[in-house]
Image: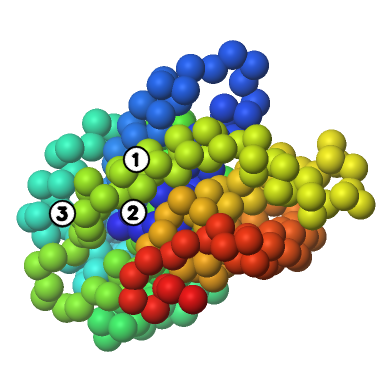
Amino acid sequence: MLNRRFLRIKVFQALYGVAHEEQVSLAISKKQLFSNLEKTYELYLFVLSFPSEFLHFLDLELEMQHAKYFPAEQLIQGLQAIKNNQVVQLLHTNQPFQDSLKNVKNRWQDVVEFSRKIYQEIRTQDFFKEYTSKSSHTFTEDKQFILTLFEYLFADSDNFNNYIEEVFYNWEDDQVIVLSTIQKMINACKSGQTQLITEPHKDEEEDLKFMRDLFELTIAHQQSFNELINSKTQNWEQDRIAMVDILLMRMALCELLYFPYIPVKVSINEYLELAKLYSTPNSHGFINGVLDKIQLQLKADQKINKQGRGLVE
C-alpha cells in the first residue's frame, strides 16, 4: 500500500510543518512522521469497511419493508441488490479483513443512522438508479458500482467527509492515497479470493529508511539546495516563489544527489506529480524548468552519481 509516492507525500507534509513552525523539534517531527504512517493505514481499513457496515442498515430496512402490508417492491429490489453485491459480501465475510479491522482503534458510531443519510444521498444518483434497476449483476458490475460509490463519497458527499474528518484528523491529508489504494484493491479483486488487503509495507525497513533519509537530508542540505534553486530563478522574486514549490524542489534535489539508486527522471517526474496535487496550476511547468536546468548543471559538474544497472550514464 505505502508506495514510494505516498512516502514522499508524508515526508513533504512533515517538511511543510517544519517550515511553518518558528520553533520545532526535528526529533519530534520525525517521530510524528512515522506515527502518521500507521494512522494512514488505519484510515484505509476503516473507510474500506464502510460497505460492510452499510449492511446493518440494509438488513433493518429490508426487514421493515417486508413487514409492510404493501411492500415497495422496487425499493426492496434496490436494497437487496446492494446487499447481494459480491464485493460487499466479500468484504463482510473475509476473515483476514475482519481480523485486520481489530487493529483499528476507531470504530463506526451510529452507523445505521449514518448509513441512512448516505442512502438518501446516493439513491438520487444516476449510478445508483442504473445499478438497482437490475435484480442481478456480474462481478464486474458489482465492482464498478462499489468503485463509483467510493468516488462519489470521497468527492461529493459532505456527510461522508464530515464524518470521517471527525474520526481521523489526517483525513484531508490522506484521502487521495486512501482512495487510490481502495480503487487499486477493488480493481484487482476476484470472485472468491481470500487475500483482499494490501500490507502497509512491502519492505518496512527499507521504507522507513527511505523516509528518514529523505527527511533528514533535505533539512541538512537545505542551504545548498536553496543556492541551486536561486541560481536558476534569478529573474524571480524569491519571496514570491511558493513554499510548496521550494520544498518539492529541495526534495527532488535531495534524491538527485543523495539517492544513488533512484533514476533522475523518476525523481523529477514524481515531484512534478506532487506539484499537481499540492501546488498551483502553473507550478508543474515552473518546477520542471528549474529542475531540468539544475540537473543539467549537476551532470556537467559530475555531481550526480547514480549506481546500479541502467542508472550509470
How crowded pointer 2 is (Cα within 10 Å; few <14, some 14-19, many 20+) is rated as: many
Q: Do the residues labelled 1 and 3 touch (CB within 8 Å)?
A: no
Q: Residue at 11% across / 75% down in the picture?
A: 192
Q: Residue at 64% across / 16% down in the picture?
A: 22
SS state under label 3: helix
How crowded pointer 1 is (Cα within 10 Å; few <14, some 14-19, many 20+) is rated as: some
Q: What residue type is labelled 2?
A: Leu
Going from N to C along the chain, the mark reached first, 3 or 2, is: 2
Q: Can residue 38 be seen in this view?
A: yes
Q: Residue at 30% across / 67% down in the picture?
A: 185
Q: Do the residues labelled 2 and 1 touch (CB within 8 Å)?
A: yes
Going from N to C along the chain, the mark reached first, 2 or 1, is: 2
Residue receiving disc 2: 2
Q: What residue type is labelled 1?
A: Leu
Residue receiving disc 3: 97
Going from N to C along the chain, the mark reached first, 1 or 3, is: 1
Quarter of the image that includes the N terminus: bottom left
On screen, residue 91 above or below 47: below
Where's residue 88, x and y in %?
25, 64
* Label 2 to label 1: alpha-carbon separation: 8 Å
Q: Can residue 162 be seen in this view?
A: no
How crowded pointer 3 is (Cα within 10 Å; few <14, some 14-19, many 20+) is rated as: some
Q: What residue type is labelled 3?
A: Phe
Where's residue 33, x and y in %?
40, 33
